Image (cartoon, rainbow, N blue to C red):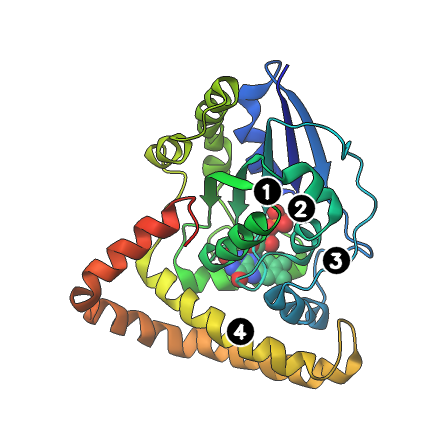
């Protein structure tokens, strides 16, 4: 039987639900080994205010932390590796960076086909570029990507995700806001992606997998959100370096800068991003071909 290694990190279980649905068609047909990454110490969920912001610099700079020992056989020969992850601060979450920079990942991923599965709010594209780079660095071969997101408008989804992440409740805030996160419908319908992946595993031919996944709408990018994200990622890099000058994770000396970053980010999101979105659409025709080219590239599984 073919062997698939699934490596995920999920706090609320949302990402795990997407992965579990995606691989449902594999049941009884391939051997599935699922590794749930466990950071040491674990990140809180729900998050407490300063801990949340304190994750930003190391996420953005992709500085590994520590993981509990992993359970899978690092000498195993896996036909496919599925890497499932949420996004933290437009970047790979620290536990995923830690895994991708580990000896264990190097050992099992070198020369192997890899499919990534992302469950985010709506800004995942630049993190996936980081992931592509880290996969390349250890000799892996990205052959497919599925990315599910919260389909609500950018601003309400910021409010609802903060509510969810800080209370642990995935319900309607004050009974009026939309439900936070990825819809149950999108999560359960992710099983449609399993079939083409299974066919690729059985035929050992992944050359057309991403095209087949894209036909099933495995990736949908909102151009205006992509534009905000790309600007945001550049600015996040400046902040992460500025904050790290005051010390590493958990150092109280950086609390002051983290608080300034928090208020900066919330102000930019609610005051500046609506104006930036308007400007984006007003200038859309000028950048039409560049935007189309970007959307095509970021929907794919190739690396620049
Ligand atoms: C610290 C932190 C930062 C986050 N930053 C982003 C982000 O930049 N972009 C985004 O689309 N989602 C962001 N999210 C939401 C996650 O991508 C994800 O949807 C949510 O945390 C649920 O994932 P789970 O499966 O781990 O529970 C963030 C979540 C956390 C905890």
Badge 4 crowding class, 10 Å Cα cut-off, few under 14, some 14 to 19, many 20 or more, is many
Q: Front-most of 161 and 131?
A: 131
Q: Which numbered circle lies on residue 43?
A: 3
Give the secondary structure at mark 3: loop
The percent coordinates of residue 4 (x first, y second) are 63, 27
Q: Which numbered circle lies on residue 9?
A: 2
Counting residues from the start of the chain, the first of labels 4 and 1 encountered is 1
Q: CA distance from mark 1 to mark 2?
A: 7 Å
* For discs 3 and 2, the disc positioned in front in the rendered view: 2
The percent coordinates of residue 130 (x first, y second) are 53, 57
Mark 3 sits near ligand 1, with its Cβ under 8 Å away: yes
Tag 1–tag 2 contact (CB < 8 Å)? yes
- Please name the residue that numbered disc 1 is placed on: 84
Counting residues from the start of the chain, the first of labels 1 and 2 encountered is 2
Counting residues from the start of the chain, the first of labels 1 and 3 encountered is 3
Tag 3–tag 2 contact (CB < 8 Å)? no
The quarter holding residue 105 reads top right
Q: CA distance from mark 3 to mark 4?
A: 21 Å
**Residue at x-position 44% and y-position 50%:** 303
């Amino acid at each position: 039987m073919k062997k698939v290694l699934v490596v995920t990190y999920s706090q609320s279980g949302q990402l795990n639900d997407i992965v579990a649905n995606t691989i449902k068609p594999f049941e009884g047909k391939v051997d599935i080994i699922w590794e749930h990454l466990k950071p040491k110490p674990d990140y809180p969920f729900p998050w407490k205010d300063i801990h949340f912001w304190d994750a930003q610099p190391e996420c953005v700079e992709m500085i590994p932390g520590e993981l509990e020992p992993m359970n899978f056989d690092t000498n195993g020969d896996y036909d496919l590796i599925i890497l499932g992850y949420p996004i933290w601060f437009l970047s790979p979450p620290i536990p995923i960076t830690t895994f991708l920079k580990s000896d264990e990942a190097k050992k099992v991923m070198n020369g192997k086909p890899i499919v990534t599965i992302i469950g985010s709010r709506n800004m995942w594209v630049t993190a996936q570029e980081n992931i592509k780079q880290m996969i390349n660095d250890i000799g892996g071969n990205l052959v497919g990507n599925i990315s599910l997101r919260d389909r609500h408008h950018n601003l309400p989804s910021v409010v609802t995700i903060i509510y969810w992440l800080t209370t642990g409740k995935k319900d309607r805030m004050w009974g009026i806001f939309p439900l936070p996160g990825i819809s149950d419908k999108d999560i359960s319908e992710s099983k449609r992606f399993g079939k083409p992946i299974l066919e690729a595993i059985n035929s050992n031919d992944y050359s057309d997998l991403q095209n087949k996944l894209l036909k099933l709408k495995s990736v949908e990018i909102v151009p205006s959100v992509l534009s905000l994200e790309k600007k945001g990622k550049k600015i996040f890099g400046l902040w992460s370096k500025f904050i790290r000058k005051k010390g590493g994770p958990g150092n109280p000396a950086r609390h002051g800068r983290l608080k300034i970053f928090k208020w900066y980010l919330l102000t930019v999101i609610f005051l500046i991003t609506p104006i930036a979105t308007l400007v984006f659409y007003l200038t859309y025709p000028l950048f039409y071909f560049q935007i189309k080219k970007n959307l095509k590239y970021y929907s794919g599984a190739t690396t620049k």
